[in-house]
Every structure is written in C-alpha cells, then in structure tokens.
Image: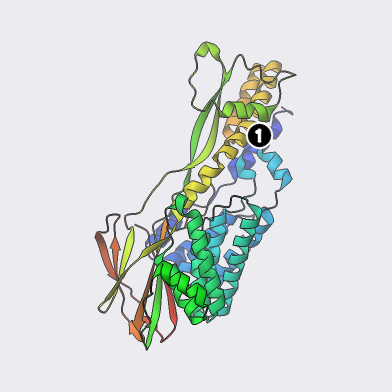
Amino acid sequence: MKKILPIFVIVSLVIGCASYNFEKVEIGLESGNPENAYNYLKKNSPKKMDIPFQYDLGLTAHYANLFSESSKAFEESEMIAEDRFTKSISKEALSLITTDNVRPYPGTEYERLLSHYYSALNYIYADNLDGALVECRRATNLIQYFKGEEEDYNYFGAGFLAHFCGMVFEASGEWNNALISFKQAAEYYKGSAEMTGVPIPEDVGHSLVRLSRRLNFTDDYERYLNQYGEPPSLTENHGELILFYETGYVPRKVEESLTFPILKVDKFGEEDNDDTVKFARTLHTREGMVVEEVELEYLLRVAIPIIYSNRPVYNGIRVSVGGETASGVLVEDVETLAIETLKSQRGIIIIRTLVRALGKYLLTKKAEKQNKILGVVVNLAGAIVESADIRSWQTLPNQIFMVRMSLPEGTHKISLSFLDANGQVRNRMPIKKNVKISSNRITFFNLRTYD
C-alpha cells in the first residue's frame, strides 16, 4: 500500500481539478447576457491562476462592456504567459508520470496576440487611445519575440494584429508607425497564407499606398501604387467605420484514443533495453498498426488532443448604411490557426505521451512481479490518470471579418446581413445603437454572433 499510495494521491489531485461548466458561459453569451457569463466565471474562478480561464473571463467582460475588468484579466493572463514560456522543470517531470494537464499552460501564440486585440478595443471604447497604442506596441514586440525565438515562425495571428495595429496608429495620427505596421501586415499575412488560406486583405495594400503618399515616400508610393492600385479616396466631411465581425466559436479540443502495439520481440524493459525515449520513437511509427495476437506483448493505449472543424452557419457579413453597402473581408481564421497549431505539435505530444505511458507500463510490470492484484491496481490507476490536455481559450470566435467604409459625418443607423458559406443571406438585423462618425476620424466597432 505504501508503494501505490502516491499513485492514488496523484489520481485524486488530477480528478479533483474540476473546471467551470462552459455551457453556462455559452448560455450567457448566446442569450445576449454576457454579464451573466462574466459573473458566473467570477464565482467559479480556480484557486490557482489559470490562463484559459483568464482569457474567457477577459472576453466575457469585453462583451459585457466591462472594459477595465476585461483588460485586467488579459493583463494577468499575459503576465502568466510570459512567465510560463520559461519551462517549469518540476511540473514537466511530473507530467511524465501523470498527465499533460499538470504542465503549465502558456497560451498559444495566436491566443496571446488576440488578447492584445481585445485589450486595445477595450481602451478604444473607453476613449483611451493611448492605452490602445500601448497594447499595439506590446503586440508588435511580442511578434518580434516570436520571430527571434523560432527559426520557422508561422506568423499565426501576426498578420491580423499588425493590420489592426496599423489602423490604430492611423487613427491616432501616427502615420509613420501606421505605415510600418501595414508593411509588417503584408509580410505576415503572406508568411502564413499558405497554411491559413487568408491572403493579404485589399485594405492593407490600399493603406500602404495612402500612407506612403501622405508621408511623401515617393519610391514606396510608386511601388505600392503599381502593386495594389489606387485606394478609394476619402470625401470631405467624411470619416471611416471599421467594423470587426466575429462569428461562431473556435472548435474545442477533444480527446482521441490511440493504440500502439508492443511486440514480444521488442524486449523493452530489460536491463540493456530501457531507453524509453528511443522506444517511444519506435512506437510512434506503429500508430494504427494491426498485428497478430501471437506477436503482441501489450497494446499501449494513450489519449491525445484533437480538433475537428466546426464552422458556424454565418460565414460572412454585409453592412448597409443609407445607400452605401460593403461586404466583410476575412482577416483572421481562428479555427484554422487552432487546428494547424495543434497539428504542428502532434508529434511532440505523442512522443511525450508515449514516454509517460511506457513509464507506467514498466511500473505495472514490476508490480505484477510482486503481486498480480497490485499490478492490476497500478495499471488501473495509470489508466484513470491518463487524459489528454484539452485546455484552450474556448470563447474565441471561429473567424473574424472586417468592413472598412467611408461615411459622412453624423450619426448613422447600420443594418447587417449575415451570409452563409455560399454568400447567401441567412439573417438580417439592425445594430441597436447608432454609430457616430466624425470627419477625418476612424470609428472602431466589433460585434459577435454565435450561430
């Protein structure tokens, strides 16, 4: 009992870490009561600071117009993420015994970048453009950090953040910084387009033409004009509406069970054959392999996370103001970022999971030699503990579309048409709150649907 007690302690710790019920968060958001979702999360906050929880708390607060609370949650999540990008050796070691769920979750790169998008909007809506500029500079520095740390950086989320920050710099009159951000946006969108399917939005090119002309950068202006064409001109006594339409939910991670055969000829676990990592790599090549029962020593079962596509019904938007109409352009495909990010990590996750499973397998074999019942108990305890790490920012949208349109100065009623994947109108609704447009100014607005 003394030998197996630690196993039961670990089992109880893992099972005891219950999370909040996300369905209650969904009900609050989808019923038009995001403050209920926020209050539910506040009442059910984990004892230890948790990054996915902070993300969900921050986004529900954002939709509830609790901008200060939202920014605070995102600020805390980023502080934790910065710390967790430095490995916790003790918890890494424990994860090889129990489950990946005990490893510190640092947030994915695109999650960290999107937290700055929402934080910047919080400051914009609170009439604090300087705060939004700070968020954009932090996001820009974070992208540079990712580029410096990774030789093959995939630019996931970087194009949209640079694009968004370019517009924020432009709104503040920082023309040079805006031009730099739009240049980066073109580079980053191009760098990720093959994997995300999101090309450089037309607005990026038009902004490069417009700003290089404003700054009298003649060579840049002529090059961009030749590459992207003449942008729409801004009429006198007009301003701009930049609307971000966020649709659906990013699909959640779920658990997938895989099996790997250990063959009788492997002799793994003998004195001269106990290199667990090396054997894990061998097993990795046997994923899904079918073998005869006479050849099979043991069938190793492991659990890993997987994401399946779950596109929302609404897959686009058309905005009408008076006689003017503009269609949304896809600027961020969060679902694809989530799927491709996890896909890139799959090999590492499988190897780490196999190493952990093989360790439990060896423990079971040793226990069986002492007592068959003890072997069964140890094997059962290992099976109970093993679970895939399915943590993520669950409240994120599936996709983000952008509409940028010139409007006359004044207060406007805005009507929305929501489109399906075939471009057909599935629903229409007006924005309840009128939008005020100021001459030569940019007005930002974001909205969310869940269908």
Q: Quadrant of the C terminus?
A: bottom left
Examine the rendering and report whether any part of residue 143 can be seen: yes
Colour style of the rendered protein structure: rainbow
Q: Residue furthest bottom?
A: 237
Q: Residue at x 48, y 41 (%)?
A: 306
Q: Amino acid at mark 1?
A: Phe
In the image, taking residue 432 as reference, residue 95 lies left or right, namely right
Q: Residue furthest top?
A: 294
- Compared to residue 250, the image places residue 207 above or below, namely below
Q: Nearer the viewer, residue 338 or 448?
A: 338
Q: Nearer the viewer, residue 372 or 29?
A: 29
Find numbered disc 1 in the image and state the secondary structure of the residue it sits on: helix
- The mark total stands at 1
Q: Nearer the viewer, residue 24 or 439?
A: 439
> In the image, residue 108 lies at what x, y percent?
57, 53
User: Alpha-carbon neighbours of circle 1 within 10 Å: few (<14), some, or many (≥20)?
Assistant: some
Q: Residue at x 38, y 82 (%)?
A: 234
Please identify the quarter of the rendering in which residue 344 is found: top right
> In the image, residue 173 lies at what x, y percent?
52, 82
Q: Which residue corresponds to mark 1?
A: 8
- Compared to residue 55, the image places residue 17 above or below, namely above
Examine the rendering and report whether any part of residue 244 can be seen: no
> In the image, residue 214 lies at what x, y percent?
49, 81
- Compared to residue 291, the image places residue 384 above or below, namely below
Please identify the quarter of the rendering in which residue 206 is found: bottom left
Q: Quadrant of the N terminus?
A: top right
> In the image, residue 169 lies at what x, y percent?
53, 76
Q: Residue at x 66, y 28 (%)?
A: 278
In the image, taking residue 309 as reference, residue 368 lies left or right, namely right
